[in-house]
Every structure is written in C-alpha cells, then in structure tokens.
Image (tube, rainbow, N blue to C red):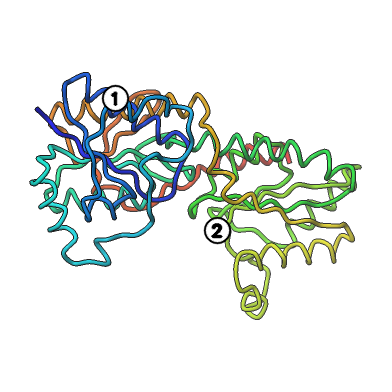
Amino acid sequence: MKRIGIFTSGRDAPGTNAVLRAIARTSFEHSYEVIAFRNGMEGVVSNHSFLMDRSYVSGILPIGGTILGTSLSDPYLENHNAMKDTKKIQEKLSITSFIGVGSFSTMKLCAFMKASDIPVIGIPATIDNNIPGTDYSVGFQTAVDYVSRSLDRLHSTASSHHRVFLVEVMGGQCGWIALHGGLTGGADLIIIPEKSYSVQEVITHIRRREGEGKFFSIVVLADTAGFPVDISDKEKQQIDDHNGLLQFLSHEISKETGMETRQLILGHLQRGGSPLASDRLLGTLLGNASVESVRRGNTGVLVGQVNGQIEYTDLESIKEKRPVDLQLLNTAKIFF
C-alpha cells in the first residue's frame, strides 16, 4: 500500500482545496493512505501531520485558500538539518511520495527535495501564473476574473468624475494578472515588468484619449513593474517603495495633464474567494494526475496542463519564472 504525503506551501491560491480533494479521493480510490501536513514546509519538517480521511475533504471544493494552512518560510535555508529531518519523517511515516502544492518557490523547494533523493511531485497553484510547465496554474483564472470585474466597476466612477485611476495588481515578478485582467477588464494602458515604459508614454496616451473625447483613463500596473526609463537616479532614490512609485506616477500624470488621479491597490482581495469552475476543474485534473503519476512510480516532476493535455516537467529544470508572451501585450494595445 502506498502512502502519499501532501502539503501546501507559499502564498495561497483559490482552487488549492480542489487539488487536495482530488489527491485524497484518487488516493482512496486506489486504497492509498494520505498523510497531510499543516502549514507548509514548516509542518513537514516539524512533522505536524495527520492521517486524512474522506470526511476531511468533504465539502471543500468551493472554499478558497487552503484547509491545510500555508507558510512562506523555507526551512531548508533556515535549518541545515531540515532535509535530514524530512527524510527521517518520510521513513517514520512510510511515505511513498510527497506532493507539494503551491507557488514558484514551492516548486523550487520540491526540486531541492528531489535533488536530495526524496520522492516528490509538484503541482502549480498560484495566482501569479509564473511557473513553467503549464499553461495556467491553479488560482490564476479566479484572480484574473476578480481584476476584470473590479475594472468593470471602476469604469463608471472614473468616467463620471473624469479621473485617471492607477490600479496596482499582483504578479510575482511577472505581468500575467495585469495583462489578462487588464485586457478583459478594458484597461486603457497596461504596465508590466517584462516591458519597459516611460512617464511620457503614459502621459501622451492619456492626452490622446482626452483628444478623442475620453476624459478618463484606467492604467493597470503590475506590482513589480520597474521604474520608468525616463526618470533620474535622484527621482528613483526618492521612491522608497512601490507605493511610492504609484504616488510618483499619480503626481506626474496630474501635473502634466491637469486631470484628477486616484490610486487603487487591489492587494490580497485577488487571492480570496471561491474559485471559478475553471480553477476547480484544473485543480481536480492536476490532483488526480499527480496520484496516477505516483502510482506509475514517476516522481520528481511538476504536473501541469499544456494545450489541454497533462504534461510532466522535470522539477530540476524549473529555473526561472515564466514571463508573459509580449505578443499578447501587442494585441492589447489595439484596444487602448
């Protein structure tokens, strides 16, 4: 009989519970046991575990976040004995394979476990969609939907008051949420980390819209977008954090256009709420496929979906975060 150890790590994403439910239900179908660890990798190293049963995953499909809890800490960096402790726990609990569910950092942790000869499978669950080996990560579509609907609401107030709104969204050093959310929410300009931009470009675009009789603009900005290319080193030093960048851009736009500006940070609201059907489905498929992979003895891989098909990627090949395809940004410009 196989024993699967599961944990969720990194920042939470809607649809993660669908993954856990699928792992558990598929495991029970094969008469496997499931050992669940609470609070991310901290729970693995400290053996904060319990034997999961059917009742634990009953009714969790529509619930956001993760019922196991999560953490951002990396015990392998903080404790040199953490890997040895993990191996001891694996042996003590007779775990056939771990399945780690979470963000890019979680996949890196899983790769480290594989390199240390610990059987593990990774499942991408992050709103940032920045993990190679899958078209979409669990949680991304739900986050994009929230951004899109938020922009829908902003349009009426922005147009009524003739204002420029600067809307900051998350992204994990990539522009997936900003680009997809901005495009589907009718943003008038999208700024992402993968593409340089200038203050003058933003101002020119807003003025052009004004000349066309559009006396408002909604600018979507990824939270890790870089500095504009046309500002001085002194100005960069005066921008002490990303909120400072929002304030700087807001001030420059207001000064140059005379238009009233507002700043809106959507923040952690993008992570919360019940997952969309698409994320529930993706989480279910990836969770099921991960157990089937354990059944075949195929570990050390990330389970993803590419072009509608389940694909397996070597965890150790995941080196860098996956940037957006700039062709989509070029398409979005048609609608600016």
Q: Residues within 10 Å of mark 2 (few under 14, many from 20)?
A: some
- For residue 177, what is the image quadrant? top right
Does 239 sit left or right of 116 as displayed? right
> Image height check: is 307 above or below 251?
above
Q: Residue lying farthest bottom? A: 234
In front: 237, or 244?
244
Percent position (x, y) of residue 216? 84, 47
Element type at mark 1: helix
Q: Amino acid at mark 2?
A: Thr
In front: 254, or 61?
61
Residue 280, numbered circle: none
**Residue at the image position 84 percent from the left and 49 percent from the top:** 208
Query: Nearer the viewer's eye, disc 2 or disc 1?
Result: 1
Mark 2 lies on residue: 224
Mark 1 lies on residue: 54
Q: Residues within 10 Å of mark 1 (few under 14, many from 20)?
A: few
Percent position (x, y) of residue 285? 35, 24
- For residue 187, what is the image quadrant? top right
> Image height check: is 211 above or below 291?
below
Mark-to-mark CA distance, 2 and 1: 41 Å
> Image height check: is 128 above or below 139?
below
**Residue at the image position 73 percent from the left and 36 percent from the top:** 152
**Residue at the image position 56 percent from the left and 49 percent from the top:** 268
Task: Say if mark 2 contacts mark 1, CB within 8 Å.
Answer: no
